[in-house]
Amino acid sequence: MLDFNMEYYRAFYYVAQLKSISKAAQALYISQPAVSQAIQKLEQYFDTKLFSRKSRSTELTPAGRLLFTHVQNAFTAFLHGEKELIQAKEHSIGTLSVSATETPLHSVILPALEIFRKRYPAAKIRLYSGGSTASSLERLHTGETELAMGVTPFSCPDEYTCFQGTAIPVVAVAGKDYQVSENDPLTALELSRYPIICPGKDSSAFEQISRWFMEQGTIFEPAYSVQTTSAIEKLTENNYGIGILPEPLIRRRLNQGKLKKITLKTPFPERNIIAMHKNQLFMHPLCEAFLNILFEHHYLVR
């Protein structure tokens, strides 16, 4: 089998396009004998003539036209890839693809995207949000996204590079009319006597909250276990019970007076934003640029 040599096919492609060995040599900045030798190598391997030489041009034979169909497709893809890579390096085109849970989405990604969009207005953004840190990582694993963001506790797999970032306070909140004092600190036992609204049981947030109660000798049995923080917020605001949520997600509601923060004798442990990408030789420049914004504004730590 002929060893694959891109230069043979490059010479074939240019001769076929320009219909001239001399013009192909000029375009490739090589000698005419080098072009002729490349064509001869291919003709020897395929044991057929690829070109017929006429007085003023070099024309493809039927066999040559068959080969050119495939070579043309390949070179079109190569040239397109080359152009896209150069433009991507200049951040002029491309798509930033990120998957994230709700906490990093609202706390980190949306503020960072405002900066990113101003710097790279031509870039497209593909954002997958919601679900657990595990589901965010799954999109990264399958190649749907190049960057995934979630929250601790999380063990980073060996095949990924992980960066830890912003600490997120977790708080207990209630609707403004809910019958619970804002100023009298509650113990874990006292808190457990109220209907608790918290994340789903398959989430790391639920595990962390359960551990907090357990460490204080209290059994954790939430009244409502829901999948999204927006649902927790809505149920809490409508006085179904006390919600447990990352503080940045409900800061606006707290400032508006629609929710009130409950003081705890022992605060919930903070959670940390975490960003993940695959260990690989090439990272799309737009993804690298977005990561740099996260580092610049101290959302992540190198």
Image (spheres, rainbow, N blue to C red):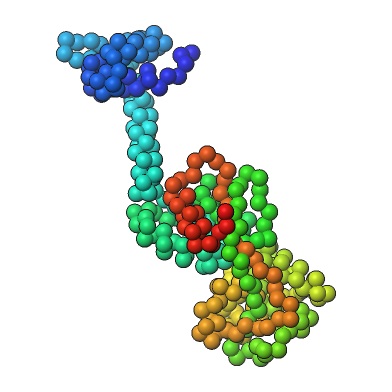
Q: Going by the picture, which residue comes out furthest to the left?
A: 56
Q: Going by the picture, which residue comes out furthest to the right?
A: 217
In screen coordinates, is 95 left or right of 49?
right
Vertical comparison of 99 with 221: above or below: above
User: 290 and 151: which one is in front?
Assistant: 290
In which image quadrant can residue 169 be found? Answer: bottom right
Considering the image in quadrants, where does the C terminus appear? bottom right
- Residue that appears at 66% across and 48% down: 157
Vertical comparison of 43 with 84: above or below: above
Q: How many marks?
A: 0
In screen coordinates, is 145 left or right of 36?
right
For the question of whether residue 136 can be seen, the reply is no
In screen coordinates, is 5 left or right of 164?
left
User: 230 and 26: which one is in front?
Assistant: 26
For the question of whether residue 31 can be seen, the reply is yes
- Residue that appears at 63% across and 44% down: 159
- Residue that appears at 63% across and 89% down: 178
Q: Where residue 245 sits in the image (x, y, percent)? A: 62, 73
Vertical comparison of 249 with 255: above or below: above
Q: Where residue 37 sits in the image (x, y, percent)? A: 34, 10
User: 54 and 118: which one is in front?
Assistant: 118
User: 138 and 118: which one is in front?
Assistant: 118
